[in-house]
Amino acid sequence: MQHEKIIKKALITEKANRLREMNVYQFEVLRTANKKQIKQAIENLFSVEVVNIKVSNYSGKPRRLGRSSGYTSGYKKASVTLKEGQTIEIAEGV
């Protein structure tokens, strides 16, 4: 699997900004990717060394439009801890 397809986008939220101060970065990743694939993708794309990865699966929320109802699509979030002294430059809109 290509590394560019595994990492969908960097999450830019208030909580993610606070975690960056502790050298933890959050990414939305492909739902079928496992921890080893995520680690390889981060290390190859950003040239950093990953120490720890925590992964969370989020299911879609119920939404309604008129009479029809459905669910939004769910996603998988990876919290990646980097080695001391290493950083990733994240631009908004990536």
Image (cartoon, grey):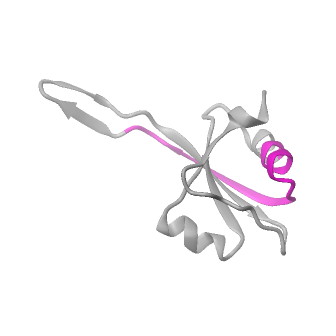
On the image, which quarter does residue 73 sit in? Answer: top left
Q: Is residue 82 magenta?
A: no
Query: Which residue appears at 73% of the width and 36% of the height?
Result: 4
Query: If the image is split into quadrants, where does the N terminus sit?
Result: top right
In x, y percent, where is residue 37? 79, 39
For this view, does 50 lie left or right of residue 34? right
Q: Is residue 49 magenta?
A: yes
For this view, does 68 lie left or right of residue 9? left
Query: Which residue appears at 74% of the width and 62% of the height?
Result: 88
The answer to whether 80 is drawn above or below residue 24 in the figure is above
For this view, does 68 lie left or right of residue 61? left
Q: Residue furthest top?
A: 68
Query: Which residue appears at 56% of the width and 65% of the height?
Result: 16
In x, y percent, where is residue 58? 48, 44
The answer to whether 44 is drawn above or below residue 18 in the figure is above
Query: Which residue appears at 79% of the width and 64% of the height?
Result: 82
The answer to whether 36 is drawn above or below residue 25 in the figure is above
In x, y percent, where is residue 9? 60, 45
In x, y percent, where is residue 35? 75, 44
On the image, which quarter does residue 62 sit in? Answer: top left
The magenta segment: 40-60
In this rendering, the count of numbered labels is 0
For this view, does 67 lie left or right of residue 81? left
